[in-house]
Image (spheres, grey):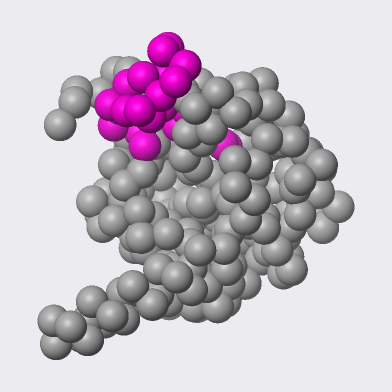
Amino acid sequence: MDTKIWTGPGRPAVFLDRDGTINEEVKYLSSPHQLRLIPGAAEAIARLNQAGIPVIVVTNQSGIARGFYTEDDVELVHSYLDKLLADHGASIDAYYYCPHHPGAIVKQYLVDCECRKPRTGMLSAAAAQENVSLAQAYLVGDKRSDLRAAVSAGARGILVRTGYGKEAEQELLSEAEASGAALVANIVDDLAAAVDQILATLSQSQPQGIQPPKFAANFRHHQPEIGRHYPHS
C-alpha cells in the first residue's frame, strides 16, 4: 500500500484492543514486567504506521476500579509498550482506556459509563479528538465486546484468535449452529493477518497524490474522565 492517506472527515483509523491483541493476555496486567508482545504484532503496527494510518488503542481497564492497580500503573505499562514497539519501528498514536466498572470497589470509579466496551464512548471520543471517521475505521480485538463496540460505532470489527479470541469464536460458532444463522463475524488468526486484510481493503480506495501528515507529535494518553460526560443508557 502506498504511503498516502485520506485527510478530513473520511480519514480511516485502526482501533486496537490491547491485552490479547497486541500483547499476551495476562489477567489484570498491572506491571511492565508482565508485558509480552504477541509475535508479529509490532511488525503489523509498523506497517500501519508506514501506510500513514492512525493506530489508536482502546482498552477496558476495570482492574483500576477493582483496586488491583492504579491509573499510574496503566500509564507505566503503556510507556513500556511504546518502548517495545519502538524497538520494531512501530508506535501507537493515542491510548484511550476506561477505568470504570458498575461493580467497582474503588468508589471514584463506580460509574455506569459509556466508555467501557461494548459501549462506544472511547471510539466516539477518539473519532472527534483524533479527526478520524468511524465509518472508515476498523476495530481489532479478541473479545465479543470488541465486535459489538465496532458494530455500534459503525466501524468494522475483526476478531483475532489470540488472547480470548478462540473462546469467542467457539461461542459465535455454537450460537450460529444453534440458530441456523450464518456466521457473519470477521475472524482471523492474529493482528498480522488483520492488518493484511485492512491494508488490502483500504488500498482499493486509496486516493492518489496525498502525502501523509504527522498524526501525533507526542505521546498522548486519554484522560478517562471522558466516561463521566456521557449519559447513562
Residue sticking out furthest to the top: 108
- From where the camera sits, is residue 205 visible? no
In this image, 56 relative to 43: left or right?
Answer: left
**Vertically, is 104 above or below 10?**
above
Quarter of the image with the N terminus is: bottom right
| Whole-percent x, y for residue 45 in the image | 65, 59
Instruction: Give the residue drawn at x 23%, y 76%.
Output: 175
Is 1 in the magenta?
A: no
| Whole-percent x, y for residue 66 in the image | 49, 27
In this image, 223 relative to 86: left or right?
Answer: left
In this image, 147 relative to 84: left or right?
Answer: left
Magenta residues span: 94-116
| Whole-percent x, y for residue 88 in the image | 82, 58
Instruction: Give the residue drawn at x 60%, y 47%.
Output: 27
**Vertically, is 179 above or below 199?**
below
| Whole-percent x, y for residue 10 in the image | 35, 51
Instruction: Give the residue drawn at x 51%, y 63%.
Output: 164
- From where the camera sits, is residue 232 visible? yes
